[in-house]
Image (cartoon, coloured by chain):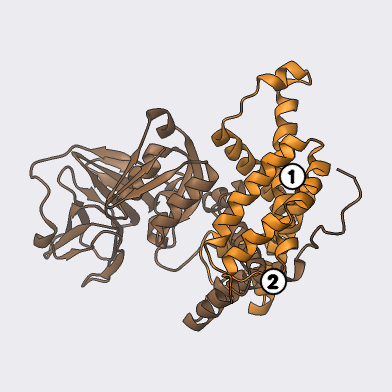
Chain colours: A brown, B orange
Amino acid sequence: MTEARMSSEPQPLIDLSDAAIDWQVLLHSGNASAADHERYQRWRRLSVEHLLAAEEAEALWGDIGHTEAAVQLPLQATPRRRYRGAAIAASLLLALVAYGGWQQAPALLADYHTSTGERRTITLEDGSRVTLNSASAFSVKYNDERRVVSLREGEALFEPAQDPRPFVVDSGGEAVQGNDAVFSVRRQGKASSVVVARGEARIGTRVLAASPDAQAQTAWQRGKLIFNGRPLREVIAELERYQHGRILISDSQLGALPVSGVFDLNDPHGLLSTLEQRYALKVTYLPWLAVLY
Amino acid sequence: MLTSPASGLLASFQEHYDDLLQFLTRRMNDRQRAADVAQETWLKLVKIDEQEVPVLHARSFIFRVAGNLAIDTLRREQRQESNLGDSDAAVQLVCPAPAPEATLLARERLAMLDEALLQLSDNARQALLLNRVEGLTQAQIAQRLGVSESMVAKYIGQALRHCRDWLKHNHD
């Protein structure tokens, strides 16, 4: 379109847009105070022009998390990876462990548990660290020969401390042993799955090694959910673990829609609204229920 | 105050409707399609209006919103034509469902963002992605990249501005 522009056409509000970007930089810097967040909320509402600039900058910030570059980032193991919590070289092995005897023990019987939406890292007496995902529970049984952790429900990431005694995770079926590994175990119905993030773990005589997906699989530990072309129904099933209430997908075709992106676990509602915008879904919220169509 | 800020925006839309329609007709080359975009603009303004935020320059704001929607519509139509060949008949057959369209627009936007990210310097891209995706603080990124914290803030600001400009450049 190269026609002459009408004088009434608005000027680009580049200054406001720059200011809105500066706000994004500050708010995500790690140095922003509660007062900064409040100031930003006030700034946003100074006028609709501010609001529009703010929304554009927020959308930009949000969308960058859904680019190919962002989704690939955790998969590129670089020599200098992160150190907070577990330093995890990318790797994965998914092993299905036959489900043994007892029914899900209630969280009340466990030594440690988290409620829905909660995450917690616990340091055990030997220095081993266990990060519990949402709605998860485990108990500890240490003796002179073995360090046994029983995962009662949900999912946990284990970082065993150096110790001559074997470190064993029991999730109802075959036990996983991983003295020199960082690994997560998740109970799902009658099966458990194991993701080895670093090192090697063992189930019986089988050795579980590692693969490039673990960084994404254990992203929950860093407060993120990472999906790379996962069907919407699986994404929603994941999301349901982190919030109260159900999410229904209205038709099965929609459930197959591939979804990619990095989402913030502390804001499951935000994930739904992102899906709404990005994939043009509609979300209807009822008490304890969201319906996607 | 006789009017709320909200109704100011909507009142202004009504007041300037003829001008707006003219402006859109020139952009869209077609009065009917212009009216559709005007309708879309109204719906968007109603949403903005619900936020009850004051308007500095209602008229220019409305034209800006309408202009953006017009561009989106034109791009959408161009793509449909190129997808289906240039024959008028093919275009006539298109009865676009809104959902896949919006998805396409979103995908295109992400593809552009990826392009923009590739154009950045390594440090600027790393700083932005480590911040946005890994959730590292500026201090942690500074340590990792071996630069000062204020440099990291600069990188991230730069990277975001570049992404914004690239989107805008490809949008108009």
Relative to B133, is A155 on the left or the right?
A: left
| Few, some or many residues within 10 Å of mark 2 (<14, 14–19, 20+) | some
> Which residue is at 42% across, 28% downward?
A253
> Which residue is at 70% across, 28% downward?
B80
Q: Position of residue B40 (x, y in %)?
A: 63, 45
Residue marked by disc 1: B71
Q: Position of residue A185 (x, y in %)?
A: 28, 50
Give the label, 1 or 2, closer to the camera.
2
Q: Quadrant of residue A117?
A: bottom left
Residue marked by disc 2: B56
View extreme (front): residue:
B2
Return the mark for residue B32.
none
Regarding mark 1 in the picture, which secondary structure is present there?
A: helix
Position of A195 relative to A166 (above/below): above
Q: How many marks?
A: 2
Distance from the alpha carbon under mark 1 to that under mark 2: 24 Å
Position of B96 relative to A33 (above/below): above
| Few, some or many residues within 10 Å of mark 1 (<14, 14–19, 20+) | some
Q: Amino acid at mark 1?
A: Ile
Mark 1 and mark 2 on one chain: yes
Q: Nearer the viewer, residue A162 or A26?
A: A26
Q: Position of residue A130 (x, y in %)?
A: 28, 63
View extreme (right): residue:
A4
**Image quadrant occupied by the N terminus of chain B:** bottom right
Q: Nearer the viewer, residue A286 or B112?
A: A286
Relative to B117, is A231 on the left or the right?
A: left
Q: Quadrant of residue A232?
A: top left
